[in-house]
């Protein structure tokens, strides 16, 4: 589960961009980001052959000024296909020969550098040329940056790959070899490569620092090759057909633009016969029973000369500050050991970087980064401590009467420094606390009473500060589980009265939490709640209310739907809410049908005929409706009767109805 996180294994700056690659749960990916805004991703590409699949695989990578990425890493998930691979940029991708242990044999890649016409790689691997058992050799390898691979032979493969063994050993009749390279640091202004070498992990722990000149590495690459004709043959030297090879290329013919190396030679000859020897036969610095993991170097201008200061990360979480030998006859000096964390909290150092412009170290740990200043002159409080420290950063300013750097001094002529012998390391010791004592009962005063606590102490004696060393930082005593008597908090404000008129009550409270009684302390004495009456003299006004509803009044209609009402009255005032009258429908049943006929009207003449006779007529009406009162009927159907009357009156009027 832990290895399935995204571990950043490649972090390279190119112009104003940051190129990063991460393992991404065994599916490596790479991104390009803007330095000014790291959240802005320009593009994302496959990380295969650029970043290892597993965080446990060692790898190294560099980005050239022309944009090519050179990576030495495992090409596959199980890590069985290691390669030095070029990608990106304008040149074609190239790699070391696949599944050929003579090229790379289970390598652990350490570092890479872009130097001149070549790209250099430093690693350790199982020595294929070692015939007796299995052993590990440290290597320096290089390829030409203008290599474009072979034609028909070694296509997509380096034609300029060469590797040579690095020798870091304690000389003697039978040399003691430090075979496993762990870290390197390149000083380009001096063409020096500092390397940390250790013994095998199953051997007695020992570490050494060896320094190689780039010219010595070049000399080995210009010398003869080591070649084995077949698996049963011995490894023998073979003359170098291209001594002083500087990545020249063909300018015409079938192999134009290919390097001057013969392709058949490039297939066979890549392991150098000569071993790269260090600057001096004996390692710059050696230490038994410890393993160094990282190295950085600072070049310091002293009063009379330049000094090389080596910083070595140990496997137990400290940094050793070492003064490199000033010449081939002198020896190195351990100036001090910087303890980053208390002994109980130490952890392995994951990375070590130096920023020369600010004179600081950046130390990467599991969860944080520690910034360590390189110049620690103020720690030396006296003249003897300052001069005796033999620290190239520091000297005694005779005017200011204090230990300063050369840059801080008011006058170089008044700045004293004498780097002649190794310092007595017991002169300056930074103080560190010892372990805490057992918890013991102790007393303390709590107001007017005395309580009890548990206390423990520690002393600044592991070691005690000496000769201007740092004092211990932090408390010398810890106190816990102190008994404490409880105390009342202030009373709260009185609550609102429980009534708006007439007598009511108010409440206020407090709690025993100022402080809360702890570890056997006395509880608070008294009540946590108080009550009091309120509105005692504020009488309530008379109660205004409705009387009950009266009976329903008589319905306004006997049938066909009427309305009836009931009433109530407001007592003690006119402002009762609601209405004083309530209505409801009544007698909604249909009324019976009524019928009424009027009497006949008198006869009335209506016209006169030609012979003097005339007509008369009379009327009557019949009405019917569903009404409760016959008097409410209105005129309905009309009935008419007519009669004829003669003019002489001899005949009676006849009725024509």
Image (spheres, rainbow, N blue to C red):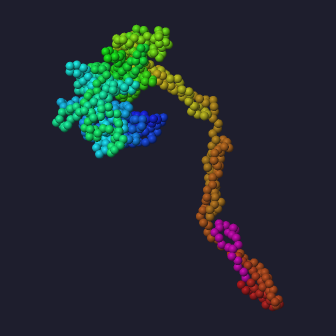
Residue 639 against residue 397 in the figure, above or below? below
Q: Quadrant of residue 201?
A: top left
Q: Residue at x 47, y 17 (%)?
A: 407
Q: Is residue 211 visible?
A: yes
The spot of residue 279 in percent (x, y) is 31, 22
Report the quarter where the C terminus lies.
bottom right
The spot of residue 457 in percent (x, y) is 37, 15
Residue 217 against residue 482 in the figure, above or below? below
Q: Quadrant of residue 98?
A: top left
Is residue 507 found inside the magenta-colored segment of the image?
no
Q: Residue at x 49, y 12 (%)?
A: 411
Report the quarter where the N terminus lies.
top left
Region rendered in magenta: 623-641
Looking at the picture, tell me which residue is in the foreground, 540 or 195.
195
Q: Is residue 381 visible?
A: no
Looking at the picture, tell me which residue is in the foreground, 420 or 619.
420
Looking at the picture, tell me which residue is in the foreground, 205 or 458.
205
Q: Outermost residue toward the left?
A: 232
Residue 453 against residue 4 in the figure, above or below? above
Q: Quadrant of residue 303?
A: top left
Looking at the picture, tell me which residue is in the foreground, 531 or 101.
101
Q: Residue at x 48, y 22 (%)?
A: 514
């Amino acid at each position: 589960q832990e290895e399935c996180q995204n571990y950043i294994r490649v972090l390279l700056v190119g112009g104003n961009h940051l190129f990063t690659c991460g393992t991404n749960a065994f599916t490596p990916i790479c991104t390009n980001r803007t330095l000014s805004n790291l959240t802005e991703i320009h593009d994302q590409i496959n990380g295969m052959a650029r970043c290892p699949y597993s965080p446990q695989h060692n790898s190294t990578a560099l980005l050239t000024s022309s944009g090519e990425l050179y990576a030495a890493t495992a090409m596959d998930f199980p890590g069985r296909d290691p390669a030095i691979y070029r990608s990106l940029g304008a040149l074609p991708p190239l790699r070391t020969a696949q599944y050929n242990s003579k090229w790379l044999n289970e390598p652990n890649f350490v570092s890479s550098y872009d130097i001149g016409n070549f790209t250099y790689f430093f690693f350790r691997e199982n020595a294929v040329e070692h015939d007796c058992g299995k052993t590990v050799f440290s290597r320096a390898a290089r390829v030409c940056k203008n290599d474009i691979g072979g034609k028909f032979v070694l296509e997509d493969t380096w034609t300029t790959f060469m590797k040579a063994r690095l020798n870091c050993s304690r000389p003697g009749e039978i040399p003691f070899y430090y075979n496993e390279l762990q870290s390197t640091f390149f000083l380009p202004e001096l063409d020096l490569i500092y390397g940390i070498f250790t013994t095998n992990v199953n051997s007695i722990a020992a570490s050494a620092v060896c320094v190689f000149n780039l010219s010595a590495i070049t000399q080995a690459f210009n010398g003869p090759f080591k070649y084995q004709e077949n698996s049963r043959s011995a490894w023998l030297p073979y003359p170098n057909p291209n001594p002083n090879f500087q990545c020249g290329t063909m300018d015409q013919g079938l192999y134009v633009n290919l390097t001057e190396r013969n392709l058949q030679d490039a297939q066979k000859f890549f392991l150098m016969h000569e071993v790269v020897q260090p600057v001096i036969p004996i390692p710059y610095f050696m230490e038994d029973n410890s393993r160094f993991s990282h190295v950085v170097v600072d070049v310091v201008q002293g009063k009379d000369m330049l000094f090389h200061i080596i910083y070595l990360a140990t496997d137990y979480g400290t940094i050793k500050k070492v003064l490199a030998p000033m010449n081939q006859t002198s020896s190195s000096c351990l100036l001090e050991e910087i303890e980053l964390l208390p002994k109980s909290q130490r952890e392995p150092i994951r990375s070590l970087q130096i920023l020369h412009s600010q004179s600081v170290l950046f130390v990467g740990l599991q969860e944080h980064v520690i910034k360590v200043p390189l110049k620690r002159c103020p720690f030396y409080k006296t003249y003897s401590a300052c001069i005796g420290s033999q620290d190239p950063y520091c000297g005694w300013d005779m005017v200011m009467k204090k230990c300063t750097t050369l840059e801080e001094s008011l006058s170089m002529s008044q700045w004293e420094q004498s780097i002649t012998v190794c310092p007595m390391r017991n002169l300056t010791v930074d103080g560190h606390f010892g372990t805490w004592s057992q918890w013991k009962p102790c007393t303390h005063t709590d107001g007017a009473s005395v309580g009890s606590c548990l206390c423990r102490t520690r002393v600044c004696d592991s070691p005690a500060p000496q000769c201007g060393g740092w004092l211990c930082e932090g408390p010398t005593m810890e106190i816990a589980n102190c008994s404490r008597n409880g105390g009342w908090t202030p009373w709260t404000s009185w609550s609102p009265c429980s009534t708006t008129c007439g007598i009511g009550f108010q409440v206020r409270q407090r709690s025993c939490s100022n402080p809360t009684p702890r570890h056997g302390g006395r509880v608070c004495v008294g009540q946590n709640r108080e009550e009091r009456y309120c509105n005692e003299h504020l009488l309530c006004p008379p109660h205004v209310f409705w009387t009950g509803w009266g009976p329903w009044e008589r319905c306004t209609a006997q049938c066909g739907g009427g309305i009836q009402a009931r009433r109530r009255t407001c007592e003690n005032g006119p402002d009762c809410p609601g209405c004083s009258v309530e209505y409801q429908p009544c007698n909604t049943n249909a009324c019976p049908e009524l019928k009424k006929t009027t009497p006949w009207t008198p006869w009335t003449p209506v016209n006169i005929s030609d012979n003097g006779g005339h007509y008369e007529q009379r009327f009557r009406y019949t009405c019917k409706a569903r009404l409760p009162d016959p008097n409410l009927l209105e005129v309905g159907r009309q009935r008419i009767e007519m009669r004829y009357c003669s003019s002489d009156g001899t005949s009676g009027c006849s009725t024509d109805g």
